[in-house]
Amino acid sequence: MCVSVVGRRCIILRASLSLIVGGQVLMMKSRYLGSRTNNQAEYEALISALESEASLQAEEVICQLDSQLVVRQVTGEYSVKNLELRRLCMRGQELTKKFKR
């Protein structure tokens, strides 16, 4: 992720996603996100990854995230107070239900 910090908001210049199976790169993509907080960007990356996996009809997915907060919110260990993050978290939780693991 290429980031420029302005005050409390990040300007995410580019977010990248790689799909690697058995050591082989199957997909790489990146997109411009605009102005987001770091947590919003983490959620959007997770959602993008899960949507990509769902479109490939994957049964199991392992996601590795930089944000412990996002992981714990999606798994329900932490509550989500921010309305925008709650919307993103609910979308992430909805997508995780499409997979066995």
Image: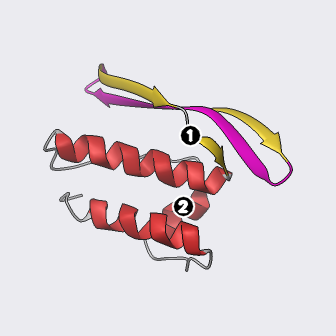
What is the C-alpha distance between the residues marked 1 and 2?
A: 18 Å
User: Considering only vertical position in the picture, is 46 above or below 33?
Assistant: below
Towards the viewer: 80 or 77 = 80
Give the main secondary structure, helix, strand or loop, of the magenta stretch.
strand
Magenta range is: 7-24
State how the image is colored. Answer: secondary structure
Q: Any magenta on residue 4?
A: no
Q: Which residue is farthest front?
A: 34
Q: Compared to 78, does 88 lie above or below?
A: above
- Label 1's element? loop
Q: Is residue 72 left or right of residue 18?
A: right
Mark 2 surroundings within 10 Å by alpha-carbon count, few (fewer than 14), some (14 through 19), many (20 or more): many
* Amino acid on which disc 1 is placed: Leu
Q: According to the image, label 2 marks what residue?
A: 70
Judge whether 76 appears above or below 92 on screen. Answer: below
* Horizontal side of residue 4 vs 98, given as left or right: right
Quarter of the image for residue 12 reads: top right
Name the secondary structure under disc 2: helix
Tell me the residue at 60%/63% (across/down).
69
Q: Earlier in the sequence, mark 1 or mark 2?
A: 1
Tell me the quarter of the picture where residue 94 sits: bottom left
**Residue ID for mark 1:** 33
Query: Which residue is outermost to the right?
Result: 7
Of the 4 image quadrants, the one containing the N terminus is top right
Which of labels 1 and 2 is toward the front? 1
Could you tell me the amino acid type at mark 2? Answer: Val
Left/right placement of residue 91 relative to residue 61 reads right
